[in-house]
Amino acid sequence: MIDPFGRVVEYLRVSVTDRCDFRCVYCMAEDMNFLPKADLLSLEELERVCAAFIRLGVKKLRLTGGEPLVRKNVMGLVERLGAHLGQGLEELTLTTNGSQLVTHAAGLKAAGVERINISLDTLDERKFAEITRWGRLPQVLEGIQAAKAAGLRIKINMVALKGVNEDEISSMLAWCGNQGFDLCLIETMPMGEVVHRAETHLPLDGVRQRLAQEFTLSPSHHATGGPARYWDVAETGGRIGFITPLSNHFCDDCNRVRLTCTGTLYMCLGQEDAADLRAPLRASADDTALEQAIHAAIARKPLGHNFDITRPAVARHMSLTGG
Ligand code: SAM
Ligand code: SF4
């Protein structure tokens, strides 16, 4: 699949549910309206769409949400997708808030997942409760240890928030180093209405310069084909990545599209245009129309987003597309 700008699309992110057991302040409003369950694709339908994407050239699949591990029977989907590994699919992975990993870490590894991203913005229990509204830090830390014990490689995603957790970035980097985890810092993105977003936006260039006074950072050769730019950290032997969609975006290399749990395909995180894949999926047991709809969507993938932190670029919250 090649888009109008010559970019090869080989990465699909699938939001398996828009629901979540947390209510992170930068991601969701306090009183979220969720999609009616009747609108959701079944797990079998999600697998069918994923299989079509794999046939058309997708090599990497990431399950996300909402919180992917709160979708009922999601592990059945993970197992069925794991069966595609080595048959066109090269990597199956997941982004999670960590709350359900005690239950599911070993099953993920058994299904062929090698590494996962876990979101953790602070190691301070009180701040964690404030940021996630409903989350509890000890539960997540236990989940992280369960993932480590299961042999999953871990990257911690930390949304950097001015006046909230910016004072913890260096200690988080040291903690990740001790644990053997990479760390990825993310700038807040203007998706959906939430409170205090513009005030807490923290440009990451300054953060990197401050970290460089404490740690020896050198540009890393590590590249995931994603928007993060990585630096090796000599003191910890680990890596730190920076995702800077506002201060310095990397849309030129974008290789991904995003499917929601209702079968809507977004060709860009920061644009409203989308393609409905549920109708062609349900119209026939044959995948011809579905594949045509996917090709038509890729043919109008836009060049990039125009994020401006003072107003939402799109009405939907991040929890719909999963980041
Ligand atoms: N619930 C899972 C989790 O938290 O990891 C997966 C879905 S969550 C939407 C995926 C990632 O997006 C998380 O790392 C989260 O911190 C990040 N995120 C959510 N809203 C964001 C926003 N407005 N700007 C930047 N990152 C955001
Ligand atoms: Fe849930 Fe993840 Fe959004 Fe937090 S960032 S509310 S954990 S979907």
Image: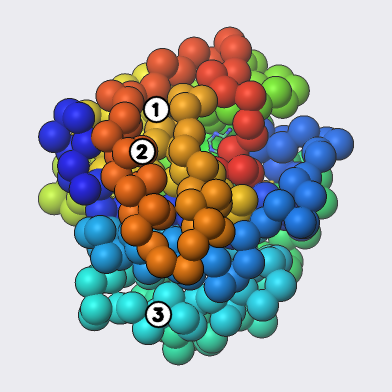
Number of residue marks: 3
In this view of the protein, which residue sits in the foreground, 154 or 296?
A: 296
Dot 1: what SS?
loop
Q: Do the residues under discs 2 and 3 have CB atoms within 8 angstroms?
A: no
In terms of sequence position, does the residue under pointer 2 or pointer 3 come before the other?
Answer: 3
Mark 3 close to ligand 1, CB under 8 Å = no
Q: Do the residues under discs 1 and 2 have CB atoms within 8 angstroms?
A: no
Residue 67 lies, in percent from the top left, at 65, 58
Q: Is residue 97 visible?
A: no
Dot 2: what SS?
helix
Residue found at the very far right of the displayed protein:
31
Q: Do the residues under discs 3 and 1 have CB atoms within 8 angstroms?
A: no
Relative side of 183 to 282, left or right: left
Callout in the foreground (1, 2): 2
Q: Which residue is mark 2?
A: 297
The residue located at (46%, 81%) in the rendering is 80
Mark 1 close to ligand 1, CB under 8 Å = yes
Q: Which residue is mark 1?
A: 245
In terms of sequence position, does the residue under pointer 1 or pointer 2 come before the other?
Answer: 1
Callout in the foreground (2, 3): 2
Dot 3: what SS?
helix
The residue located at (48%, 34%) in the rendering is 274
In this view of the protein, which residue sits in the foreground, 277 or 147?
A: 277
The residue located at (47%, 38%) in the rendering is 275
Residue 131 lies, in percent from the top left, at 72, 41
- Alpha carbon separation for disc pair 2 and 3: 26 Å
- What's under tag 3, amino acid-wise? Gly
Residue 166 lies, in percent from the top left, at 55, 33
The residue located at (18%, 42%) in the rendering is 2
- What's under tag 1, amino acid-wise? Pro
Q: Which residue is mark 3?
A: 82
- What's under tag 2, amino acid-wise? Ala
